Image: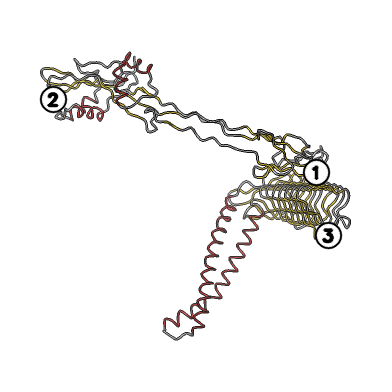
Amino acid sequence: MENRNGYFKLDMRDAGVFLVVYAPTGTGKPVDIKEVTVYLDEKNFNKYDLKEVNRIVNTTQESEEVYIGEWHGIYENEMMQVTVSSDKMLAFCRFYAPSNGGKRMTAEDIISDLRLQKIIVGIQSEEIKRFLEERKYCTDYVLAKGIPPVNGTDAKIEYFFNTNPNLKPKKNEDGTVDYHDLNTISRVEGGQLLARLHPAVKGQPGKDVFGAPISARTEKNLKLEFGNNVAVSDDKTEIYSQVTGHARLINGKVFVSNVYEVPADVDNTTGDIDYNGNVDIKGNVKSGFSVRAKGDIVIDGVVEGAYLSAGGQIIVKRGIHGMNKGKVEAKGNIITKFIENATVSSEGFIESGSILHSQVSAGSEVRINGKKGFVTGGVIRAGNLVEAQTIGSDMGTITRIEVGVDPEVKERYNLLQKQIMETRKEMEKMKPALVNYSEKMARKEPVSPERVIQIQSIAKNYKTKQEEIAGMREEFAKIHELIQLETGAKVKVNGSIYQGVSIAISDISYNVKGTISYSKFVKEQGEIVVRPL
């Protein structure tokens, strides 16, 4: 059975005008009473019995009819109703059957009606032909389609060096870092291609069914951004390194630094080093000296009680002997053989073979790998993960592990808490003077001009403190919410963790009792639980 919507038509007779309603066939939809009444009103038939019209509209018979008014000798032709989509890209046409004696529309009639409604773009000839062949009424046909715009392609820059500062170093079979094959620093040679710009491709505008233009999405244009030691091609689409050194991508700009090399130790013979690039030290960094670099620091030897600061990564191949005064800071990652009695902080990850009695914090992860892979004593902080073979010792060495929030955020949280308490104390000290002044004013007691000026100063300071504490509380609440929501951080122990170790995940603490092996500590439903690896 053919699928066809229900439809209606007028039948003109000497006895009057009758509305004939035909039931749908197959999966077709029934006639809509509102559609019928709109049609009748448009044809000026307004004295019909709505109840009877509604009855036959809902007929289950093949067809039914009802008298709707007198006939004035005019037949009704086949007609088309046009509806345009909100984006003006589609014209939906719905046809209504002619009465007996009425004329049918031709393709020329349909196109003419569309043009009368100023629809001129994307006329669908095949769809018009389909209607003329099947004549399905009360059914939508898409007889015009706008021409959509063709979006262009955004410009793209292709880089030919490592732009990921968090790429992990390669490991030896025993789990130690392979310092002979580090892939965390992007070394480049003089003349090496650094980046290529693929220019944007312009799009093509479209048109809606009325012929109005539709703009294509504006494509994103880029240009190569670079610093010193970089050459650009004549067509501005390629850049090359002019020196052998290290390449870095910072906020979309390519920097190349040639390396400052120290052939031996950093000591009395060199003094402190402060360099606007990368530093490569072949020896040790002696106690009391400092090395500052805008780029990476690579040290073949040992760092003693020294100070290191890098805008990039720090790699210490033989380890860090802090001597309880050494401090190492990096915007990037820190990789070292061991950390002992030192303060070490990284905005990226930290990898070490062991950590002993140190203050260590990393923005993302602290991994203690290698054959022993132990952390004993001190405090270890990381945003996402602390992983080690052994944590603590069988002697019950006090060791603190904290994960779940970036250490800098946690430090800010603690500072705000302290500042809020201090500000409240300051405000409490001001209150008695302000209350006393208010009581005197209420009793209309005289107050000296000097005292009035003093009270005004205190009141102004009190208001400033109120505004400060409101801002601090707002920031504190946001950080507190962040801490509460953190659920993905964990502590992993690939060997054993001992009594004396305390673990904090976000705002929840857990004290290890006894020895636990091959486990991970995670936060679930507001508490820290132990799960097997």
Apparent side of residue 45 relative to residue 296 in the rendered image (left or right): left
Question: Is there any visible trace of residue 394 in the rendered image?
Answer: no
Apparent side of residue 436 relative to residue 318 in the rendered image (left or right): left
Numbered-mark total: 3
> Picture coordinates of residue 4 (x, y %)?
32, 19
Q: Nearer the viewer, mark 1 or mark 2?
A: 2
Vertical position of residue 515 compared to residue 90: above or below: below
Question: Which residue is label 1 attached to?
Answer: 370
Question: Which residue is label 3 attached to?
Answer: 288
- Label 3 CA crowd tier, 10 Å (few <14, some 14–19, many 20+): some
Query: Mark 3 or mark 2: which comes first in sequence?
Result: 2
Which image quarter is the N terminus in? top left
Identify the residue at image location x=80%, y=60%. 325
Vertical position of residue 230 compared to residue 412: above or below: above
- The amino acid sitting under disc 1 is Gly
What colouring style does the render use? Answer: secondary structure
> Picture coordinates of residue 480 (x, y %)?
58, 56
* Mark 1–mark 2 CB contact (< 8 Å): no
Apparent side of residue 468 relative to residue 348 in the rendered image (left or right): left
Q: Nearer the viewer, mark 3 or mark 1?
A: 3
Q: Please, which residue is most extreme toward the front here?
A: 234
The answer to which of 11 and 235 lies nearer the viewer is: 235
The secondary structure type at the circle numbered 3 is loop
Q: Please, which residue is most extreme toward the left here?
A: 15
